Amino acid sequence: MNKIFRIIWNTATGSWCVVGELAHARGKTKSTSKGRVVMGIIVAGTVFLGANEPVLAAATGGSGVFTTGVTQQDIASNVATGTGSNASGGGATAIGLNSNAPGIQATAIGMGSNASGQSATAIGGSTASGAYSFAIGVNATASVNGGIAIGENSASSDAGTIAIGLKAIASGNSAIASGADSTASNLYTIATGFFSTASGNSAIAYGAFSSASGYGSIATGTNSTASGPGAIATGLGSSASGSYANATGYYSSASGSQAIASGTNSAAYGDNSIAQGAFAQASLNSVAIGSNAVASINNSVALGANATTSAAVAVSSVTVGATTFGTFAGSTPVGVVSVGSAGAERQVTNVAAGQITATSTDAVNGSQLYSVASELNAAITNIANIPKNNPSGPTTTGNTAPVASSEGSTFAGSVGAAGSNSLAVGTNAVATGQNSTATGQGAMANAAATTATGAGASATAANATAVGAGTQATASNSVALGANSMATGQNSTATGQGAVANAAGATATGAGALATAANATAVGAGAQVSGSNSVALGANSVANQANSVSVGSAGNERAITNVAAGVNTTDAVNVGQLNSGVAGAVTQANQYTNQQVNQLQNQIDQNNRTAAGGIAAAMAAGGLPQPTSPGKSMVAVAGSRWQGQTGLALGLSTVSENNRWVYKAAITSSSVGQTGGVVSAGYQW
């Protein structure tokens, strides 16, 4: 057998052919030079993919001669080179030991490679059986039309699927699996990262050990899990298991339907709940905003760092001393709103004046309460000025008030994923921290367990999460969500375009929201908090005092409506309670005033009766007769009546023998119980 061959261009078949050394070719042309370059690349690829024996060796001379230790096949436009190689399809190429290219225009390169599909390519011991399929790597399989399998034991088994990486599997229509042991097993799924799994229809799993099993779910970050339909989990260890739930941040959890958890270790475990801030927790239909805020009571709100809720208490009336106030509006509360906790209360500032009606449930502000207190104080002062038990004193009127491997993965032009189990995707993306993820142009995640998603996003401290173009999360456990948002304080959270939380435990939610003090919470577009442990609630609200809650700003106050009746001494009261309290206080004041006036009137009436009785007794004494003859004596009785009172007099009188002296004595009594006596003597001439 001739062992010296040449590669020449066959103009009849339009392909390169292997021929004997005596065959003639045209002169050395530009195209033959290119042909040798192409063949050299194919040979280099074959050697790289691990062929067990030399297949072709390019000669250094200009004749295009190759040396081989195996047989060769030249059927029509086919090329088969290597022991046991077979190129039976029209225009097929098989290069390498036992390589097989039965498909039309198929290419099999490397030992045991098999390209049976039309225009399929199998390289390095792989199998490409689908039309236009592409497989590279030992035991890689592309079995469907247009399928791509790259990497040892990778598999593309459904239409339009792509599997890249060791043991990567793409089995759903148009699915993409990228990364060692990644699996995309349903329609339109994407799994990217070591051991990532996307099993829900249209689901996306992004990051080492990430899992997206819910329909249309998205899991981003190492160990993230999105199992509910439409759920989104973002950040290391994050979990969104409720339907359409959203969990963002280090080990955040949203288990309720349509629940939202945002912040390190935040948990929204009730349906329709919102927990925002590091370690925040919210139950059914509840909202917890702020670091360590806990809304454990259904339908309630915990507002501000460390705020907690307690069970709502129905209050329809209240008794103070001997007086009962009620019935109150809003006496069947469905939940509570708390802005602090026992021993760590906050003021609620910038409260607009609430409506004051019998059915109002508005909150009242300090000026309304001050007005009531002033009027009540004036009434009490006027009552105190009424004379008491003093019949001889003056009576004043008119002055009272009205009563995959541990190595990182780098994709799409990234600078690199240098951290263990890290992932970097995008031009100039960098993930240098362990378990970190950087996604987007220029994204940077350079600390342990960090996540940076979006162009220019930066997460530079442990457990930090930055999502959105230009976002920055530079302190441990911080979360920045929204374009150009910044969370620079430890355990801080900034959510919304341009939101800033730059102090420990601070939370800023809303476009342009600003929280600059420790444990401050700003909620609403343009809301600002500069007082520690304070809360600004609503667009452009301002809280600049420590331990306060603001729902507006100077000149832009808001009414707080639907306020349940307060129970404890630090609870807010609604206008219904205030009206009832005012009415009770006025009633009590009227009762006291009436009592004092009645006592005074009774005293006056008694004085009038006493005076009338005294006058009646005096009239009776004056009406007693006396003897007119010398030496005579007389006993006499007289009665009288004056202004409804009666008088009685008993008298004894005597005229001296010489008719000069007259002696009289008398005793009197009246109908009011008065008694008296009189003695008199007279001399006549």
Image (cartoon, helix red, strand yellow):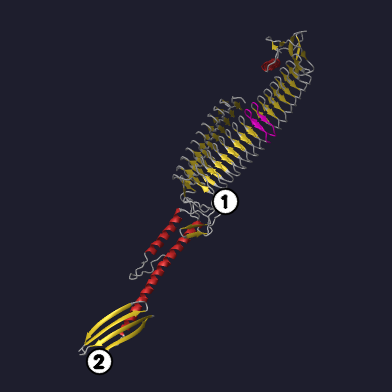
Is residue 185 found inside the magenta-colored segment of the image? yes
Q: Main secondary structure of the magenta part?
A: loop
Specify whether 383 is left or right of 215: left
Residue bearing the label numbered 2: 629
Question: Could you tell me if residue 10 is visible in this image?
Answer: no
Mark 2 residue crowding within 10 angstroms, few (<14) / some (14–19) / many (20+): few
**Residue 304 coordinates in the image, percent (x, y):** 50, 43
Q: Which residues are magenta?
A: 180-201
**Residue 101 coordinates in the image, percent (x, y):** 76, 20
Q: Which mark is residue 334?
A: 1
Please tell me which residue lies in front, 236 or 662: 662
Question: Image height check: is 628 above or below 322?
Answer: below
**Residue 297 coordinates in the image, percent (x, y):** 56, 46
> Residue 263's quadrant in the figure?
top right
Residue at 53% x, 55% y: name it.
315
Please tell me which residue lies in front, 534 or 621: 621
The mark that comes first in sequence, 2 or 1, is 1
